[in-house]
Structures are given as structure tokens and as C-alpha cells.
Amino acid sequence: MSGLTAEELAHQAGTSHEQLERFVELGILKKPFDERDIHRVRFAERSTAQASRSKTWPAARRSTSPSRMADYARPRETLVSGDVVALADDAAEFEPIGDIGLRGVVDAVALFRALIRDTST
């Protein structure tokens, strides 16, 4: 796989350089970038957009859960809710870690660890 610059990845994935840096900070992406990251960025963008439009998420969960999940995650770990797992279908793999009480969220949230598939074969 050949490497991509941040600008090339942002252009090909249809996102901003700032969003790429956010994904790096959250552990969704790691440098150096390659072609597989185009799919990771698109998946993360769709998941975020779908979750924010979902009528099943109360407004408070929409605004606090993603940041609270990031606070709970260990370095280089990406945590998602059951809503994202349902949206992903077979596009990604997830490992359940349990119902976790997040600060600022009334009910415990079922969290899942996103697993990176090896697509090099």
C-alpha cells in the first residue's frame, strides 16, 4: 500500500484536514495514512452523521455521549455505542465491553470496542 498525505486523504475521503486530525486524536486513524484509511474516514463520517440524525437518540445523548466515550476510551481505542454497531452492519467488527455509566448521561450506555480489520490479504 502506498502512503497518502493528509491532504490527499482528506480530498479522497471527502472531509477536512481538521476532521482527519480529530480522527487521529480519537485513535480512529494513525499516521502514516494509506488507502485503507479512506474507508475508515468515510465510515466514521457516516456513523457520526447517522447518529446525530437518529430520532432514537435524545438530544442530551447526541451531544454528550461521543465525547464521554472518548474520555472513557484507552489510548488508540475507539469506542462506539450500540446505535453505531447497528448502523455498521457488516462494515466493521466490534467487541462488546459492557454497559458503562458515562458522566453527564442518565442511563448506562452499552459500549463496544471498534476492531480494525486486516484488509491487506
Image (cartoon, rainbow, N blue to C red):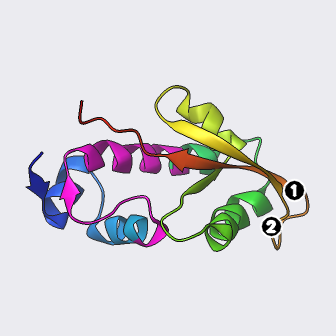
Quarter of the image holding residue 9?
bottom left
Q: Is 36 located above or below residue 19 in the figure?
A: above
Q: Residue furthest left?
A: 2
Instruction: Identify the residue position indicated by label 1 in the image.
Output: 108
Magenta region includes residue 38 = yes
Q: Position of residue 23 (x, y in %)?
A: 41, 64
- Residue 81 appears left or right of 92: right
Residue 26 visible: yes
Residue 70 is left or right of residue 62, and the answer is: left
Count residues near mark 1 (Cα–Cα under 10 Å), then give few for <14, some for 14-19, many for 20+: few
| Front in this rendered view, residue 34 or 83 | 34
Q: On the picture, is 29 further left or further right than 107?
A: left
Q: Where's residue 21, x and y in %?
A: 34, 71
Give the amino acid type for the residue marked by disc 2 in the picture. Leu
Tally of numbered discs: 2
Magenta stretch in the rendered image: 25-48
First in residue order: circle 2 vs circle 1: 2
- In the image, residue 45 lies in the stretch drawn in magenta: yes
Where is residue 106 drawn, in percent x and y?
91, 63
Q: Which mark is residue 102?
A: 2
Residue ID at (41%, 70%): 22
Q: Residues within 10 Å of mark 2 (few under 14, many from 20)?
A: some
At 32% across and 42% down in the image, what residue appears? Answer: 39
